[in-house]
Amino acid sequence: MVNDTGAVFFILGLVVVLSLWLESNHKIFKKLGSGSLVILIGMILSNTGFLPGESYAYNFLMSSGVSAGIVLILLGVDISSIRKAGPDMLKAFGLGALGSAVGSAVMALILYSSIGDETWKLAGQFTGTYVGGGMNFAALGAALGTSSDLYAAAVAADVSVTAFWLIICLAVPAILGSKNGEQSVSLESNETFTLEKALYRSEHPINISHIAALLSITFGSLWLAGMLANWFSFLPEILWLTTIVLLMAQIPAVKQLSGSAMLGNFLLLLFLASNGANSVIARIIEVGPAVFYYAVGTIGIHGIIIFGLGYLLRIDAGTLAIASQANVGGSSSALALASARGYGDRILSGVAVGLLGYAVGNYLGLGVANFIKFVLA
C-alpha cells in the first residue's frame, strides 16, 4: 500500500492523466467523462489496497485543494451567462430536497426494526446531508446526540454512497441528453472560446507572470474569505470566497490572465479522485449493512423524484444533475460536476443552490427527525 503523502499525490495525479487520456481517445469513456473516471479509478485503487482509505492528501484536496480549484474556475466565469439557468436550477434543487426528505422518512420507517431507537436521528442526519451536504450531517449529528457507533457507521455509508452518486450524476446527462451538450471539446474548434473550452486548454500562451498572479489571487482570496468568515460568521466561508473572486474576475487585468480555468479543473479532478479513494467498501462491511441500506434507499428515492419529476417538467438533465449534487455533496460537488461536464453557464447557479442547501438542510433535517420520532413513539 502507498502511504506516503507525496506518493499519494503522485498517484492521484497519474489517475487524472490516465482519465483525461481515456476520455480523449476512447468513445466508450468519452460519454462517461473524466470526472467519473477519476472517481472510479480512485475507488479501485483504494479498495484493492494500493491506495490508503485515509490520507492527509485526501483531507487537503477536500478542503484547501477544492477551494483553490473553485477560485481558479470562478475567475473565468461570465456572470451574464448564468441568467437562463437560474429558475430551472432552483426548481431542480427543490425537487431534490423534497426527494431527500421523503426518502429519509420512508427508509426510517422501513429499517426501524434493524437500526433501533436512534433511527429518527438518522432520519434527520440523512435528510440534512442529502439536502445540503456533509456540513449538515455533522451539525445534525451533534444537535441530535447520535451515538458514536451509529454516527461512524452513517459516515462510512454516506461517504461511499455520495461517491457512487457523483458518478451517476456525471453519467445521467450523457444518458438522458442535455440541451447544452456534453463537456467534450474539440481542440481544433474555431468557435468562440468559452469557459467550457478553457477547462481543457488555454486560449493564449501561459507565462510565469500569469501563474504568479493566479496563485497570488488564489492564496489571497482564500485568506481573506477565511478572515471575513471569522469576523462575520452569519455568512459561510464559501459565500465570501465566491463574492471576492467574482469581484476580482471583473478587473480587466485579471481577465487577461490565461490558464485559470484549466488549472482549477485539474484541482477539481484531483478532488474527485480523492473522493473515490476515500470510499472504502470494507468500512460498510465492518459497521453492518442496515445503515448502508438506509443511505442507498434515501439517495435512490431522491434520484427518482429529482430526475423523474424533473424530466416530466422538462428541466434539462445537466441542470438536474448539478442540482442533485448541490443537494448531496454541497457547493463544491455541484461546481466540480458543472466543471467536469463543461456547463459553464450553470456553475454559479449550482454554487448558489448549494449554499441554499447549507442554509435549509439543518431545518429540514430537524423537522424530519422530529416527525419520525413522533411517528415511531
Image (cartoon, rainbow, N blue to C red):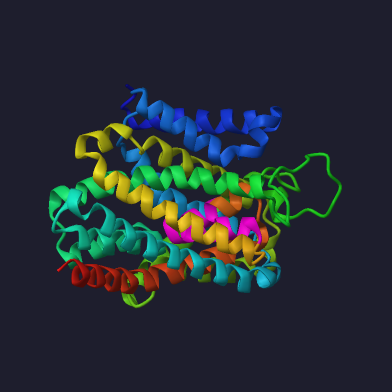
Q: Going by the image, does 67 lie left or right of 292?
A: right
Could you tell me residue 266's position as x and y percent?
Answer: 56, 42
Residue 244 versus residue 15 in the image, above or below: below
Q: In the figure, residue 34 lies in which quadrant?
A: top right
* Residue at 68 percent of width and 51 percent of height: 258
Q: Does any portion of residue 135 appear in the rendered image? A: no
* Residue at 68 percent of width and 62 percent of height: 255
Compare residues 14 and 374 and report the one nearer the observer.
374
Residue 315 versus residue 43 in the image, above or below: below
**Was residue 318 drawn as part of the magenta stretch in this picture?**
yes
**Was residue 62 drawn as part of the magenta stretch in this picture?**
no
Q: Going by the image, does 1 lie left or right of 112?
A: right
Compare residues 4 and 46 and report the one nearer the observer.
46
Q: Going by the image, does 373 lie left or right of 60?
A: left
Could you tell me residue 135's position as x and y percent?
Answer: 33, 61
Residue 73 versus residue 228 in the image, above or below: above
Could you tell me residue 233's position as x and y percent?
Answer: 32, 75
Q: Does any portion of residue 42 appear in the rendered image? A: yes
Which quarter shows the N terminus? top left
* Residue at 72 percent of width and 48 percent of height: 197
Residue 108 versus residue 169 in the image, above or below: below
Could you tell me residue 306's position as x and y percent?
Answer: 52, 61
- The stretch in magenta equals 316-336
Secondary structure mostly seen in magenta is helix
The total of numbered circles placed on residues is 0
Which quarter shows the C terminus? bottom left
User: Which residue is at the far right?
Assistant: 190
